[in-house]
Image (spheres, rainbow, N blue to C red):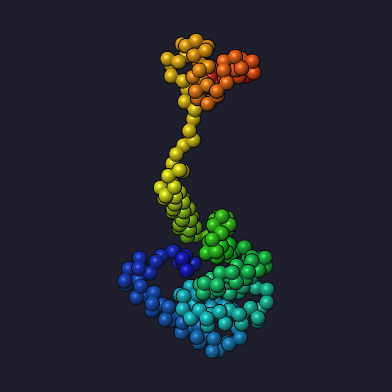
């Protein structure tokens, strides 16, 4: 998945000595869970915690999903267990199913755990619902989620929005390059040159007649009121 849930450091950012210690600790953790599972195969908490641990490690996800499903069957209505199931679905890339399960977890939750809105935000982000993803991330922050994790998500969201804007801008420019007509601005009627403004009324009418392609004589223009209308238009006066 794009975001690491419950871990603020990337594996390659951890010193080698610490990574060796982490691997040793992970091995001991696996052994402890396997022992507990053999002793208590139907213990819902063991099944859930082991499944969630596997999801964080991104290992044996199908097995983790089976254990999570068993935990939910043993203890129905447990929002934490359903959150685990939804998160494993997310890690498997089954985002629509993950959203459905997480909605159920949120509706049942009475613990006010910040992990649930944080996970739901990640699922929504994977589905392209950026606005609602940000909403739930901020809700998780208000509920006590690690601020560094939230800031990382918000920064990535902002970068995504910026990239989308740049892509849209580039696409529009490319489209305009392929369509020369789009570059042309609407032609505006040019005013008469200054020299024409000092001519007599009849001269101005001749100029207007040439522009408008009118072949009527000066008398018919005056009779029909065209002369006054075109003079007003030429001089920029209101009718």
Where's residue 74, x and y in %?
A: 65, 81
Q: Residue furthest left?
A: 16
Position of 112 compared to 8: left or right? right
Position of 208 compared to 194: left or right? right
Where's residue 27, x and y in %?
A: 42, 81
Position of 25 compared to 117: left or right? left
Q: Is residue 140 above or below residue 104?
A: above
Rendered residue at 61%/86% (across/down)? 42
Where's residue 119, x and y in %?
A: 55, 65
Rendered residue at 46%/75% (across/down)? 58
- Mark yes or no: residue 166 visible: no
- Mark yes or no: residue 11 visible: yes
Q: How many marks?
A: 0
Where's residue 165, x and y in %?
A: 46, 50
Rendered residue at 52%/83% (across/down)? 63
Image quarter for residue 66? bottom right
Q: Nearer the viewer, residue 175 or 80?
A: 175
Q: Is residue 143 above or below residue 195?
A: below
Rendered residue at 53%/16% (across/down)? 205
Image quarter for residue 233? top right
Q: Nearer the viewer, residue 231 or 206?
A: 206
Position of 61 compared to 226: left or right? left
């Amino acid at each position: 998945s794009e975001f690491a849930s419950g871990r603020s450091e990337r594996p390659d950012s951890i010193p080698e000595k610490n990574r060796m210690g982490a691997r040793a600790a992970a091995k001991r953790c696996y052994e402890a869970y396997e022992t507990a599972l053999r002793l208590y195969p139907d213990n819902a908490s063991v099944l859930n915690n082991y499944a969630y641990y596997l999801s964080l490690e991104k290992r044996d996800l199908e097995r983790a999903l089976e254990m999570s499903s068993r935990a939910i069957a043993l203890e129905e209505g447990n929002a934490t267990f359903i959150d685990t199931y939804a998160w494993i679905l997310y890690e498997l890339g089954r985002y629509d199913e993950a959203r459905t399960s997480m909605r159920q977890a949120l509706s049942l939750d009475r613990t006010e755990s910040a992990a649930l809105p944080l996970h739901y935000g990640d699922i929504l982000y994977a589905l392209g619902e950026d606005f609602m993803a940000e909403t739930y991330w901020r809700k998780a922050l208000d509920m006590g989620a690690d601020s560094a994790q939230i800031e990382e998500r918000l920064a990535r969201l902002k970068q995504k929005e910026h990239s989308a804007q740049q892509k849209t801008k580039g696409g529009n420019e490319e489209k305009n390059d392929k369509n020369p007509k789009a570059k042309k601005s609407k032609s505006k009627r040019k005013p008469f040159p200054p020299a024409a403004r000092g001519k007599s009324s009849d001269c101005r009418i001749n100029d207007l007649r040439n522009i408008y392609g009118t072949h009527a004589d000066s008398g018919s223009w005056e009779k029909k009121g065209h002369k006054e209308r075109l003079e007003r238009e030429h001089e920029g006066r209101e009718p």
